Image: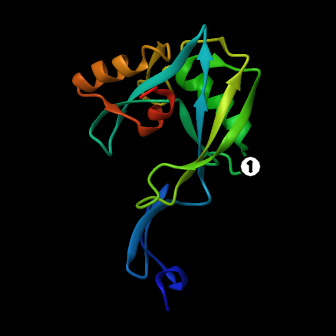
Amino acid sequence: MNDATAPKQTMWQGKYVRAIKQGRWEYVSRTNEIRAVVILAEHGGKLILVEQYRFPIGRPCLELPAGLVGDEDHHADIDETALRELEEETGFTAERVERIGEYYSSPGLLAEGFTLVRAQGVRKVGDGGGTGGEDITVHLVSRDELPAFAERKRQEGVGIDVKLLMLMDL
């Protein structure tokens, strides 16, 4: 039997994640078919970014707005979740979202994938900042300024989400 056909064993499971062993491989996946959505949104020619504390890395992280699809409502869909998360985290909303594709951020360790969407018709409707003590800081940054802005944040000790690489002209 090879690793791909080996049975999956759940080694540990919490509310949102589980550790799995399959053959000689160990990896992490989301529970209950929960997926993530990542939102690419611009307003006034600037990218809408968020900075929030992330416990796995022990510091704030600069990233695109994002959220979990199905973590609270198992019938939620990607588009409505994207719009809700965009507004909760950033105070912006959009007329609609366009699905760009499915991606995996660290496929050697995580089974989690995410749907990348582009927000269309973005407008400011509130303060943002997240819910339940998320304490999210919103940044509006032009694409041209993004590499220097990310480097300044890195020097301040802020982690930089790998998804921001797709927006940088390196």
Q: Residue at x 47, y 82 (%)?
A: 3
x and y percentages locating residue 77 in the rendered image: 73, 44
Classed neighbour count for the residue bearing mark 1: other residues with Cα under 10 Å, few (<14), some (14–19), many (≥20): few
> Which color scheme is applied?
rainbow
Above or below for 50 versus 127: below
Left or right, 116 with respect to 138, comes to right
Residue 70: percent from left, percent from top: 64, 48
Query: In this view of the protein, which residue sits in the foreground, 101 or 125?
Result: 101
Locate residue 62, reporting x and y percent: 39, 28
The reply, left or right, for residue 101 in relation to residue 54 is: right
Q: Up-down: is 116 above or below 27? A: above
Q: Residue furthest bottom?
A: 1
Give me the residue at 41% from left, 29% from top.
170
**Residue 13's x, y, as percent?**
44, 65
Residue extending farthest top: 44
* Residue beneath the point at 30% across and 23% down: 151
